[in-house]
Image (cartoon, grey):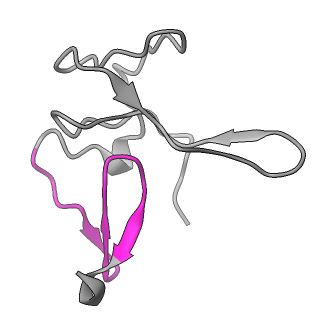
C-alpha cells in the first residue's frame, strides 16, 4: 500500500495554475470521478519528473522500480514484463 499522505516538502501548489517548484514547467495530474466525488492523484512534472508525492518523485534520479512494477511521476504503474 502506498502512503499518499507523504507529500514533498516543497509541494506548495496553486490549483489554478500549477507550476513545478523544481523547474518551473506546468504540472499535470490524473483524476477520476468515483460516483460520489473527485479523486486526484499527485501533481507531476513531465519535464523534470518531479512529483507532489515523495514516493513517486523521480527528479533526483531515484529508481522508479518497486515490487516488479515501474512507476511514473504521477503514480501510474506498469508491470516490467509488459514493457
Q: How many marks?
A: 0
Give the magenta part as a residue range. Answer: 61-78
Towards the viewer: 82 or 11: 82
Towards the viewer: 8 or 64: 64
The majority secondary structure of the magenta stretch comes to: loop
Residue drawn at x 40%, y 47% is 74
- Image quarter hosting the N terminus: bottom right
Q: Quadrant of residue 40?
A: top right
- Image quarter hosting the C terminus: bottom left
Q: Position of 5 compared to 64: left or right?
A: right
Residue drawn at x 27%, y 16% is 21
Residue drawn at x 36%, y 41% is 54
Q: Position of residue 18 (x, y in %)?
A: 42, 16
Q: Position of residue 36 (x, y in %)?
A: 90, 45
Q: Position of residue 19 (x, y in %)?
A: 34, 15
Residue drawn at x 23%, y 61% is 64
Magenta-span inclusion, residue 74: yes
Magenta-span inclusion, residue 22: no
Q: Residue furthest right?
A: 36
Amino acid at each position: 500500500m502506498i502512503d499518499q499522505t507523504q507529500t514533498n516538502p516543497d509541494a506548495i501548489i496553486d490549483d489554478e495554475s500549477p507550476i513545478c517548484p523544481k523547474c518551473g514547467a506546468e504540472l499535470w495530474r490524473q483524476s477520476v470521478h468515483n460516483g460520489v466525488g473527485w479523486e486526484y492523484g499527485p501533481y507531476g512534472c513531465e519535464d523534470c519528473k518531479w512529483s507532489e508525492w515523495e514516493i513517486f518523485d523521480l527528479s533526483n534520479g531515484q529508481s522508479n522500480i518497486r515490487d516488479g512494477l515501474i512507476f511514473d511521476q504521477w503514480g501510474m504503474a506498469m508491470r516490467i514484463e509488459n514493457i
